[in-house]
Amino acid sequence: MDIGPLSSVQLAHIAREHFVNRKSRVEIAEETGLSRFKVGRMLDEAVEKGIIRFEIVSSPGIDLDLSMRMKQRFQLEHAVVIELPVDTDAEAQSTLGAAAAGLVDELVGRDDILGVTSGRTLNVMARRLEGLPCHAVVQLAGVAGPIQESGLEVIRRLASFPGVQPWPIYASLVMSDAQTAGGMLRQPGISAAVEMFDEVTVAMCSIGSWAPPNSLMMMNPAIGDDDRARLLRRGVVAEVASTLVTDAGEVIHDLDDRCIGVTEKQLRAIRSRVGIAGGPAKTRAIRAVLGSGLLTSLITDSFTAGRLLAG
């Protein structure tokens, strides 16, 4: 409906006083001689007639609706869903790593101790970072897969920032037997990092998929064909650090005494546990890990979020 110029001016004036100059309805009422109820009705009228227009601005590339639905559906502290142009694992790794780098300042504070796992996506994050807000970073699991994609490479990049104290683990994630693992855990450099696990306040974690296979841990030479087949029969479909998870969200402890990494109990004790993963090959694994309650937050892509919400 058209409104006259005088009415339009009055509505615009009241709208500006309230929304731009931050005056209360009572203050505007006192200045104009109107009742505060009349001021309220005029503000509503200004919205209805298009004099007041609201624009909600979010970070580019973030799907707000999917983010909120993921947060509510999986009872997460934070969920960030990044829009992707194509639904591929390679695109998810690249885009999510870059997005995670942009979110570090919001997730990690100056007094936090950051823990990181291995993973291609985390390596992208580390390469894209221009600084780190905290002063200590801990490798949460030993080396899994190629060295250029390991937690050592992630922590090396993060430790290059001024004032950052690294706690690396120069050992394989999985050992051939429990005795060898116990010996490695007694090594001074490794034990120092392991002792820091209980001090970590924010963990940024990749998620490995065992079915279909897309896991650095699964590629570890210490996990033989017999081990792999047995774990798959037990229902393992995913891992976070060295914690193995089934479709039902159950944690499988078969390899615990052979692993050099944060335990399930220690991981759950970390205040903020952020998963960074997406892509077709990781969807089943992400769903399993969300069901386990191991994560408090998730950064994923729009295609994966759609599949998770539809499942």
Image (cartoon, rainbow, N blue to C red):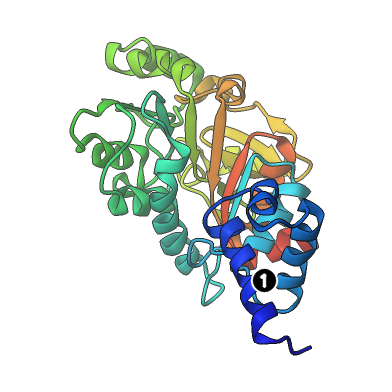
Q: Which residue shows up at 72% across the image and 58% down it? A: 308
Q: Name the residue under label 1.
A: 11
Left of 61 or right of it: where is 143?
left
Q: Which residue shows up at 28% across the image and 38% down it? A: 158
Q: Where is residue 1 in the image (x, y as percent from the top left)?
A: 79, 88
Q: Nearer the viewer, residue 38 or 216?
A: 38
Q: Nearer the viewer, residue 189 or 98?
A: 98
Q: Is the residue 103 above or below the residue 67 in the image?
A: above
Q: Which residue shows up at 21% across the image and 37% down it? A: 161
Q: Which residue shows up at 33% across the image and 13% down it? A: 192
Q: Position of residue 147 (x, y in %)?
A: 30, 44
Q: Is the residue 192 above or below the residue 73 in the image?
A: above
Q: Is residue 307 visible to us here?
A: yes
Q: Nearer the viewer, residue 12 or 184?
A: 12
Q: Where is residue 25 in the image (x, y as percent from the top left)?
A: 69, 51
Left of 58 or right of it: where is 284?
right
Q: Where is residue 272 in the image (x, y as percent from the top left)?
A: 55, 31
